[in-house]
Amino acid sequence: MENQKPKKKRSQFLEVWRRFKRNPIALVGMGIIILQILLAVFADVIAPGDGWSPGFNMQDWGNSRQFPSAENWFGTDHLGRDVFNRIVHGSRISLQVGAVVVSISMIIGVTLGAVAGFFGGVADNIIMRIIDIILAVPNILLAIAISAALGPSLVNVMIAVGVGAIPAYARQVRAQVVSLREQEFVEAARSIGASNFRLIRRHIMPNAMSPIIIEATMGFATAIAVAAALSFIGLGLEPPTPEWGAMLSDGRRYMLAGYWHMTLFPGLAIAFVIFGINMMGDGLRDALDPKLRSGGMSKGRFEKLRRAQIALTNKGADTNVKK
Amino acid sequence: MLKRFLAVLAILVMATFVLAACTGGNGNDEQAGTAPGDPPATTPADPPGQTGDISAAPTGPAGDTTRTDFTILVAALPVSMDPIQSNDNASSMVNNMLYSTLIYQSSVDLSVHPSLAESWEFVDAQTLNMVLRRDVVFHNGDPMTAHDIKFSIERGAVSDQVEIILGMIDSVTVHNDYEFTIHLDFPFAPILSHLAHPAAGILPMNHLQGILDSMGEEDGLAHFADNPVGAGPFAFNSIVLGDAVTLVRNNNYWGHLPVIETLIYRLVPDPSSRLMAVETGEAQFAQAVAPADIAVAEASPNVTMMRRPNMTIHYIGFNNNRAPFDDYRVRQAIHYALDTRGIVQNVFMGAGAPAQGPLSSQVWGFHPTPSFDLGSQGANFERAQELLTEAGFPDGFDAAIWWNIPNTQRSTIAEMVQFQLGQIGINVSIHSYEWPQILDETERADGEHEMFIMAWGTVTGDPDYGLFPLFHSSNHGGAGNRTFFSNDEIDRLLDAGRLETDPAARLPIYAEAMEVIRDQSPWVFLWEGEELHAVSNDMNGLILNPAGHHNFATVWFE
């Protein structure tokens, strides 16, 4: 038992990786993410300075709104700060927001979902109705409301975005747990006296991980996008934090006047990272659970499958799709 | 969960409110200051066409006129179309066209001229006899009499919103339908320019009284504010909340009939979008062009940039009730440490001018009180450091600066202040609040504000309006003195200035007051504003008003 376990895990991981690396777009996505992580880790090397003088917060009013040049690769903003430096340091903020938001929402969401699914009854009802209510409010609106109520700061942005992401986890996990809890191996464990906690932790959750991992990956991208949106409308981080959404918002005011670089580069940064994570998430989903492809989020693929299925049912009513 | 829903709802409602409350860059601290019939005032006679100048402006080349509808893109819609229920730029801009006032103040030089009041005479410094025109009819057909004047003016005198404009009026005595006397609480020199403010607009007594009687006080006032009736050049037609206010020409206008038949104020919050709409011909007037876009407007073949320095002063206020800002040396140190010229140059890109004291140079009685010796650097960090050390803060301290969403110019200013004060060890954190929230907090003597960015429009053009509400210790809080500045010398000077009726004697009083204010530094003076509007090339006949309340009744197109 002690020997077998890690070995089994490793082979499962390798199997996923084998499937994942067959998908070139997913690999590109992963490349983008790795690049961003490297940027964040080595931000102080790539764009040195303690922020104020010199550094990403260093203002040079006489040198404001300069177009890209050898000196300032991405130009300077309205306060004469180097846009490239700020984007590099901004990648730290984005990663931080993404990671914390996913952690908050995953921990709470998975716990709630597992409790609801495992115990059922009143607990299930109460938890899921609360989740339904949160779901009823559009994600971005919820984030705006919370953020406006708490005031702008990094922690509040994380809470605001995190709360909205809880329902997705809770529902996924609940569905998994409901189907798993009646399985024979759970019965078996229960019959030899395993506690509820142990049943959930050791027997049910490991089998419900794939959708959570996929949800977490996608949630990472959403978190970055919503946080940027909050900053864009002035409910995000406090200045002078080099947040990409805030940079976009600053630059927007100078767009008509022709200072394109102030919006283009932060915009590209946001777009690239979200594109990367989504591509990686798609690949991960396919690799983790090939069966999920049919219900996958890729619209084209879903359509193709649906049409195939319709064709199939039209061909012969005897085809028992359900098995 | 209900709470959260309510919060969301509240935010959405608040968003619209904020848009309504914050005009372009200035919030509702910009107030109205002109009356209708605002031609190039060469004669002190009637506003409506008597001399060549006056008749030339509104009529234009009859026959050549191609357009009779006029769309104005505004940054905010009126908070209220009842002249005394709100005192903000957006409301005044509309009310100015809906209502007529006793006096009108020329856009050209802010001189006062007869309007509804045919003539007037000061019996003594506290008593003003006036004679009303006999040909004035309200939009609903009621003829205007002295009873309407008494009703409207006395109503304004006890209104919280416009107390600073009409509060000094004790009562109005009616002698007959066209003669009346205004009694003041004390001799008040600038009373005539106050009577020209849109807040002193005259409304039909019987009409409003009827509404109040049938609907009750509260509902009736709300109803009137949404269905206003005045005697101005344009009458109310319709309002679509969050979109537009439409006025139509008052064909029975007592003054010169406008060429424009339909006047539309349409809300477009984004300044660049406003400019683009004029460029494409969707509208003819874009309010408050962003400084960065001035060059774009000037380069456009369809658009003309109209500019005029205005009477607004933008400032950073210190809460004098809160340590360490209760020490004038700390306030002075910050004054020394800020390169306000650099800030103004960067944020406003050459529009307006760096402030030279608590009043705009456009205001009568302006006396330049240049900042302390800042040297060629624009800021004097050594002197700032010395003052901080004297005050007992050699290593600086932590402080907060507030600005109101969505005024991004102020957020930029806050970031620049944060950067510069960082150099003398003051760690500044930046907080953004909604406009109503920032107003509430800065009104309280125990408010937690430390530094805040605001503006004040001296819309009457008289130094009393620009100084008394802001620096006199009797006006702490919402009345205007949000810094809670108290200084006996200033109180004495400002009292003397408003009671003195001889203009020549007032000048030195205000000059001295401005120097004391500079030395005490309850504010850092930032920027003298500028009216920056983009109009379509075929628009004629408009003279920008330095109070920001332009007379659109004289516009024509060709």
Image (tube, rainbow, N blue to C red):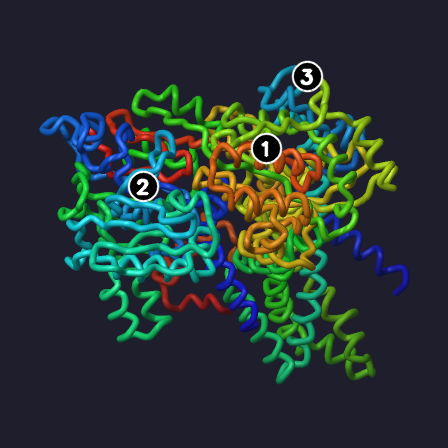
Amino acid type, mark 3: Glu
Q: Please give left or right for residue B108 compared with residue B374 in the image.
A: left
Q: Please give left or right for residue A129 compared with residue B144 in the image.
A: right
**Mark 2, residue position:** B104
Residue B28 at x, y = what percent?
A: 48, 48
- Disc 1 and disc 3: Cα gap in Å? 49 Å
Residue drawn at point x = 31 percent, y = 41 percent: B104
Q: Please give left or right for residue B434 compared with residue A113 in the image.
A: left
Please, which chain is the residue tagged with disc 3 on?
A
- Disc 2 and disc 1: Cα gap in Å? 27 Å
- Disc 3 and disc 2: Cα gap in Å? 57 Å
**Mark 3, residue position:** A71
Q: Please give left or right for residue B451 compared with residue B308 in the image.
A: right
Q: Which is nearer the eye, B327 or B530?
A: B327
Determine the image quadrant of residue B182: bottom left
The C terminus of chain B lies in quadrant: top left
Q: Earlier in the sequence, mark 2 or mark 1?
A: 2
The N terminus of chain B lies in quadrant: bottom right
SS label for mark 3: loop
Determine the image quadrant of residue B497: top right
Amino acid type, mark 2: Tyr
Residue A154 at x, y = what percent?
A: 70, 50
Residue drawn at point x = 41 percent, y = 43 percent: B75
Q: Mark 3 or 2, which is nearer the eye?
A: 2
Q: Mark 2 or 1, which is nearer the eye?
A: 1
